[in-house]
């Protein structure tokens, strides 16, 4: 499994370069990157939500991730949002235009204002977690559905990092 991460609002910023998860060190680096997120920094938390633009920039970051010839890897863009798109490109058009090596563009909403209705037939709308507290459980369920995660510790470490991100967000 490989993972990369970006945070968006009006702007997109990659906070974790896409890389294969091969050991506990990489999981630790991902967890630290998630805990260090500050959604209010750098114009991210401006009330603007540019989902379509974030999908485009994520696709560019993911397609730059080179895999070995013949490697069996699934490249996904998973959008998590607590709002509806209100700036930039139409996410439905952008998601439908994403082509291989990206396999699908999915969405998981947080709260009642989230809108993932733009997800097309090549992606999955995972619905909405009721709030940031319920987000961890919803994300774990989504990951279990998408991937065969070999070690429970991998999911636990990711969950801890996400809790740090949620705590940081709730302080804003």
Image: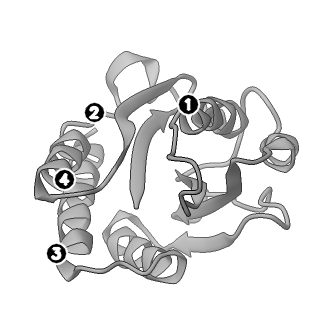
Q: What element does badge 1 sit on?
A: loop
The residue drawn where x is 68% and y is 49% is 102
Density class for disc 1 (Cα within 10 Å; few <14, some 14-19, many ≥20) is few
Residue situated furthest top in the rendering: 42
Q: Nearer the viewer, mark 3 or mark 2?
A: 3
Q: Dot 2 corresponds to which residue?
A: 38
User: Can you tell which of label 2 and label 1 is closer to the viewer?
Assistant: 1
Report the disc number at residue 64.
1
**First reached walking from the N terminus: tag 2 or tag 4:** 2
- What is the quadrant of residue 134 in the picture? bottom left
Q: Which residue is mark 4?
A: 164
* Label 2: which secondary element: loop
Give the foreground label among 4 and 3: 3
* Mark 4 residue element: helix
32, 42: nearer the viewer: 32
Q: Earlier in the sequence, mark 1 or mark 3?
A: 1
């Amino acid at each position: 499994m490989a993972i990369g991460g970006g945070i968006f609002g009006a702007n997109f910023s990659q906070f974790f370069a896409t890389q294969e998860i091969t050991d506990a060190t990489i999981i630790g680096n991902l967890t630290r990157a998630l805990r260090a997120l500050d959604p209010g920094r750098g114009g991210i938390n401006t009330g603007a939500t540019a989902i379509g633009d974030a999908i485009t920039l994520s696709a560019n970051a993911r397609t730059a991730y080179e895999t070995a010839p013949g490697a069996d890897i699934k490249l996904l863009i998973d959008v998590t949002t607590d709002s509806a798109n209100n700036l930039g490109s139409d996410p439905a058009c952008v998601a439908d235009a994403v082509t291989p090596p990206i396999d699908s563009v999915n969405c998981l909403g947080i709260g009642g204002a989230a809108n993932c209705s733009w997800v097309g037939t090549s992606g999955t709308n995972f619905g909405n977690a009721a709030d940031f507290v319920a987000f961890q459980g919803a994300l774990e369920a989504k990951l279990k559905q998408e991937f065969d995660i070999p070690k429970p510790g991998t999911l636990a470490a990711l969950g801890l990092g996400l809790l740090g991100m949620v705590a940081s967000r709730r302080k804003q």
